[in-house]
Image (cartoon, rainbow, N blue to C red):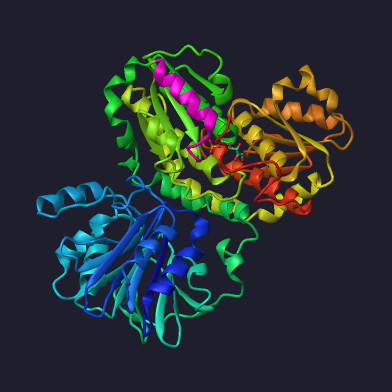
Amino acid sequence: MCGITAYVGNDNALPFLLQGLVKLEYRGYDSAGVTIIDSANKINTYKAKGRIKNLEELLEGNHVEGKIGIGHTRWATHGVPSNLNAHPHTNNTYTISIVHNGIIENYQELKKDLIEKGYHFNSQTDSEVVVHLLDYYYHGDMHEALKKVISIIEGSYALCVVHNDNPNVIYITKKDSPIVLGRTQTASLAGSDIPAILDYAKDVYFMEDGEIAVLTKDDITFYDADDKLIQKELIHIPYDNEAAQKGGYDSFMLKEIHEQPYVIKETLRGRVENGDRVVLPELDAIHDKLPSYNKAYFVACGTAYHSSIFGASVLEKLAGIPTITQVASEFRYNDPIVDENTLAFFVSQSGETADTMAALRLAKQKGATTIAIVNVLGSSISREADYTIYTLAGPEIAVASTKAYTTQIVVMELVAMYIAQALNRNSYDYRKLIEGLSSLPAYLEEILKDEEIFKGYAKLLEHERDCYYIGRGLDYASVLEGALKVKEVSYIHADAYVAGELKHGPIALIEEGSIVIAVATQPNIASKTISNIQETIARGARVVLFTIEGLDVQGVENTYILPNVDQLLQGILVAVPLQLIAYYTAVFKNCDVDKPRNLAKSVTVE
Ligand code: F6R
């Protein structure tokens, strides 16, 4: 991942490639690169770690010119941010160059095979296998070679390919990763997202999975997945670049909420085998040591702390290891009882949070085995932990965390299953749980269709000063996160309570018209939460309830029935409506949802 540009036309390719990459900067990246084929048909590739400005400086000194080229900004997923891992990648004889967005799931076996065939790898990336495979299968026809390669690679990809044998053509294909194409009077263009090409083309082609596009300066030819020539429809983009960066959504937060089905799929990709085994090579080094751990910790801040409460519970249930969850700023000063028999998880979207980092250092010092669950590859926490497992949420731009939360829980479910399987604990039906995980993206798509319903619930909050969130067990993590989202983006005071605690104090706050948002998805205790809800209704509360089918919810004003998935997964489903309630409440109150007051995306100070 993350940004792609491509140009073939009458003019120099570089200005388009670079401006397109700049237009995609909002997505986040850690390195950038371009390949230009010059008039002597030579492939010239330049890459630079860091900002696009570094690449521009490198190019300035080299007077690069050519009418065909591909560009890329990389958000690292496999291999740290570095010049070598940056795209484009070239084959060993510098005749082919590619850029790739997505993840090649079977790259390790392909890489092994290619090394045996004599190919030399320059990077740690999964993407590099593609260029060597193209080299291997290229016998004078790149279209044929590309068809062969996409029949071998597994995973997600948007791929642009150039070969200096045919220096007037770009080949493009995709699966589960977007690519957009356009035409000017004198050129064919491509970008991984609309903003890259929108200043040049307002009418664009969207490619479908398995299609191949052949771009020349005069036209674009499309072939379907069966290699039949097809005509594609031009789609007019009715909005400007700023809106395009948000994928047509009104804000990054809304876009990121809607990205969750996709990023959950990406986070699961390649991590499950035969439908019932979890594959986490990141933990293989401690596989045999797992029986020696007598305690686990989950340490994090904010939203990551809430996903940790959830994950800790799942780990205890599946693996039977006593697990403590602690806020990082407390852990670091509490003299925690941690030793070499402790497994300590540090969870962070940014991988830079100062308190989480300090807690990680302390746990290491005390002898614990440390595991980071982070989103940003190469971040400080990922570098310092003994082992790191990445969520693949992609760049999260809105300050309020949404897709990082749900992907963190997905990773925690996988980790808990991996450890439980290593400990031979077979009391849970892993096949069913894995099936459930795989079904989440489709269920989330369904839930997202009910946006208007959640908007309606947000209307209830619009003029409130306070509101109350209640839930028990795993649902408590969900309500903590739901309440935090409302606080952060709409500035309404939202308190989350364990439902059973209401009568020990908080119920004194409930009066006529109080808003209570309740989550009751855990079959063994849902009816208890519903009794607590009745107690609030009796005191005049207006209730929004998220629950599962089959419970007696009479008298509850607003009930939303969640799809029927395993109880350990309901927290992922309910997160989305709770995020949307917070989002629309903020919108109704005219708050700046993407940049709430007083908050920063990455908290690198104590
Ligand atoms: C909430 C939010 C914050 C972060 C917290 C930890 O929406 O964004 O509470 O979750 O600052 O940040 P990371 O996960 O980057 O360590």
Residue 523 point in image, percent of width and height: 59, 30
Ligand 1 location (quadrant):
top right
User: Which quarter of the rendering shows the N terminus?
Assistant: bottom left
Evaluate whether residue 213 shows in this view. no
The answer to whether residue 131 shows anywhere in this view is yes
Please report the residue visible at 54 percent of the width from the left and 28 percent of the height from the top. 355
User: Which residue is at the front of the view, 247 or 38?
Assistant: 38
Q: Which residues are magenta?
A: 350-366
Residue 601 screen position, x and y as percent: 58, 43
Image location of residue 272, percent across then percent down: 34, 41
Q: Is residue 21 magenta?
A: no
Q: The C terminus is located in which quarter? A: top right
Name the residue: 32% across, 72% down: 64
User: For residue 304, which quarter of the picture?
Assistant: top right
State yes or no: residue 358 in magenta: yes
Q: Which residue occupies the foreground of this view, 508 or 5?
A: 5
Q: How many marks?
A: 0
At horizontal 34% and vertical 45% (from top left) the residue drawn is: 80
Q: Relative to the observer, which residue lies in front, 462 or 399?
A: 399
Residue in the image at 53% along x and 75% along y: 199
Name the main secondary structure of what is drawn in magenta: helix
Pick out the residue farthest to the right: 512
> Relative to residue 546, is residue 456 depicted above or below?
below
Above or below — where is 207 with respect to 464?
Answer: below
Instruction: Give coordinates of residue 185: x percent, y percent.
Output: 45, 88
Residue 56's image quarter?
Answer: bottom left
The one of 323 and 9 positioned closer to us in this rendering: 9
Above-or-below relation of 475 to 28? above
